[in-house]
Amino acid sequence: MVLPSKLTKNLSIGGYSLITAEKHTELRLLPEKYPGIYQCVEPENVSLFVGALHEILEKKCDDINNVAREYALKFLSKNIVLSDFEEYLNKMYKS
């Protein structure tokens, strides 16, 4: 999955994120697998967006989103990404 660079940085620092994405995209599925990583609503649905934004704002701003931070450490660090890419290339080369 390719994440927008701003989202990757926000996850890394344990920030709260609200994004929009079409149904059945990986960005929509990720919060189901890792609840709390970020909130995702369908594009152009203003009422859902505003509701999700209010939910985020009700959280203390100085709290760290531990789910997002742990996800970033586990899956988005440079060494992990490069290792996964190397493994992928090795599988492709052997095929």
Image (cartoon, rainbow, N blue to C red):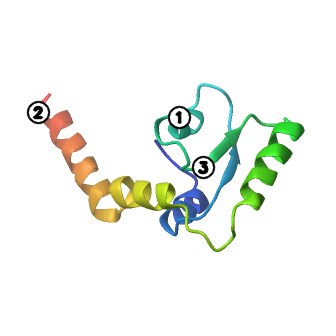
Residue shown at 72% from the left, 56% from the top: 56
Element under label 1? helix
Q: Which residue is mark 2?
A: 94
Mark pair 3, 2: CA separation: 37 Å
Q: Circles 3 and 2: CB distance less than 8 Å?
A: no
Q: Residue furthest left?
A: 94
Q: Nearer the viewer, mark 1 or mark 2?
A: 1
Picture quadrant where residue 39 is located: top right
Q: Is residue 19 above or below residue 64?
A: above
Residue 9: which quarter of the image?
bottom right
The residue that disc 1 covers is 32
Q: What residue does disc 3 label?
A: 38
Where 89 falls versus 92 (above or below)?
below
Amino acid residing under circle 1 = Glu
Q: Residue at the location (82% across, 44% down)?
A: 51
Residue in the foreground of this view, choosing between 86 and 56: 56
The answer to whether the residues at label 3 and label 1 have Cβ atoms under 8 Å apart is no
For mark 3, give the secondary structure.
loop
Label 3: few (<14), some or many (≥20) within 10 Å?
Answer: many
Image: 19 above or below 70: above
Q: Residue at x 26, y 48 (%)?
A: 84
Q: Earlier in the sequence, mark 1 or mark 2?
A: 1
Instruction: Provide residue 54's location: percent of width, then percent of height.
Output: 81, 53
Q: Are marks 1 and 2 in contact (CB under 8 Å)?
A: no
Q: CA distance from mark 3 to mark 1?
A: 10 Å
First in sequence, mark 3 or 1: give its number. Answer: 1
Residue at the location (63% across, 59% down)? 16
Which of disc 2 and disc 3 is earlier in sequence?
3
Give the quadrant of the C terminus.
Answer: top left
| Residue closer to the observer: 68 or 95 | 68
Residue 92: image location, x then y, percent: 20, 34
- Three-letter amino acid code at the position of disc 3: Tyr
